Image: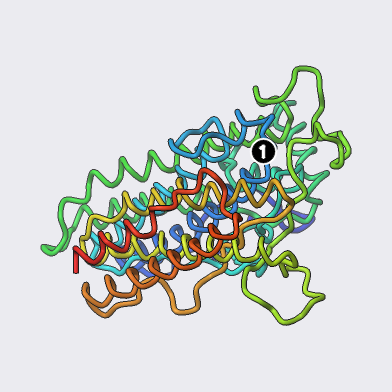
Amino acid sequence: MLRRHETATGVTATPSEAIVRDFQDPYLELLRLLREAAEIEHALMVQYPYAAFSVKPKYRRLRGNGFVGSDRDLTGVAIQEMQHLNQVNRLLVELGATPCLIRQDFPDEPDIYPFPFELERLSPPSLAKYTWAEAPADALTADDAGSRSLLDRLRAVLGEDIRPNHLGSIYGTMIERLGEVAAHPSPRFPDLRHWVEILNEIKGEGEVAHFTFFRSVFLGTHAAFPTGLDVWSLDPADSRYPSFAVPTNPTAIPTGDPTDPRRISNEGARRKAWLGDLHYWTVLMLLDLSYRHDVSTSGLAVQHMTDALRVLGFDLAATGHGLAFDPLSMGYAPGVDRAGSLEVVRRLAAEAVVVAGRLGTEGLLPADYAVDLNQATVDELAALS
């Protein structure tokens, strides 16, 4: 919950505000905040690459190469969000709690955002949301011309009725609660003091580096854009416009309703998006294995992100389609123990072997798709069983 600042005219919407404390026990409060932060990082990890996939090849400096975390391009920022998700979950596990790999379903509006986040192309509306979400508490309230100008431009896109965002505040509050827990630790916990530095680094990446990056893209001043060309004033149909017209919130799951706006009508594209879902779910289950069962599979999860999901995402966007990132109804912690989890993830990767094989036979797979990755994952998990 948020404590909003009241004024004579009502609620003042600022980017970040104080978090209301639910539990007096700092340990319980820290767990609550960490799980909420994990949901935020997961949501950003999905939305940012979807926007990156929509960026046209001529703006490759903006979309990034998809292999290294960076605050200079969209894919690099998405990788950093995955790293944040990883670190938050590892702290949860060190505190004796279960990891959190769920996220809010789109387009439902979660309480943790000042507006509903969606899977959508890179555009002024999506960039305004990302800039607002990553802004530090005082970035858009400082009494200077630059801040006022940016705030006016954001409100021109988002509207005046913007709810407060507490993405930055949640990390600041977590650091405070972590300090309380570390000061009186349980004998069950390792030394938690180094986690204060890690959380401060995450907070800084968001409130400084990511905010600065998204602000430059929103204002059209990023180095990827031609000097003197206001790319966001172009007609979206103009070949110089930075992004492809990908759909909003697509689903690879057959809906049975031909009028459903989320439906991917092209069957070949839908099947590629379904393969993308299989990789997305495999990534999350591999992360769960590394958290709950101390299996060294996080590197394999990164491979599925960079060598499969990334490739499919760019391929689909170039033809006006998009990855679905559908949530998996059975969750991402499928086994009651290590053996059970390994079995489920192995079978999921084996499912991707079959789907990719059929797409490859029909000539529908991108040339740079890692065709051997799924079988290699099956073999590695079988060896760990």
Residue placed under numbered mark 1 in the picture: 141
Image coordinates of residue 184 in percent, x first then y, are 18, 58
Amino acid at pointer 1: Thr
The residue lying furthest to the left in this view is 187
Q: Report how many numbered discs are placed on residues in the image.
A: 1
How was the colour assigned to the protein in this rendering?
Answer: rainbow
Q: What element does badge 1 sit on?
A: loop
Can residue 364 be seen in the rendering of this structure?
Answer: yes
Q: Quadrant of the C terminus?
A: bottom left
Query: Is residue 59 placed above or below 201 in the rendered structure?
Result: above
Foreground residue among 279 and 363:
363
Query: Is residue 337 placed above or below 99 in the rendered structure?
Result: below
The residue lying furthest to the top in this view is 227
Foreground residue among 74 and 360:
360
When asked about the image quadrant of residue 256, the answer is bottom right
338 displayed left or right of 242: left
Can residue 15 be seen in the rendering of this structure?
Answer: no
Image coordinates of residue 35 in percent, x first then y, are 41, 64
Foreground residue among 229 and 60:
60
Residue for point 59% across, 38% down:
138
Image coordinates of residue 276 in percent, x first then y, are 53, 60
Within 10 angstroms of label 1, few (less than 14), some, or many (20 or more) residues? some
Query: Is residue 23 placed above or below 248 in the rendered structure?
Result: below
Residue for point 70% across, 37% down:
56
Image coordinates of residue 139 in percent, x first then y, are 62, 36
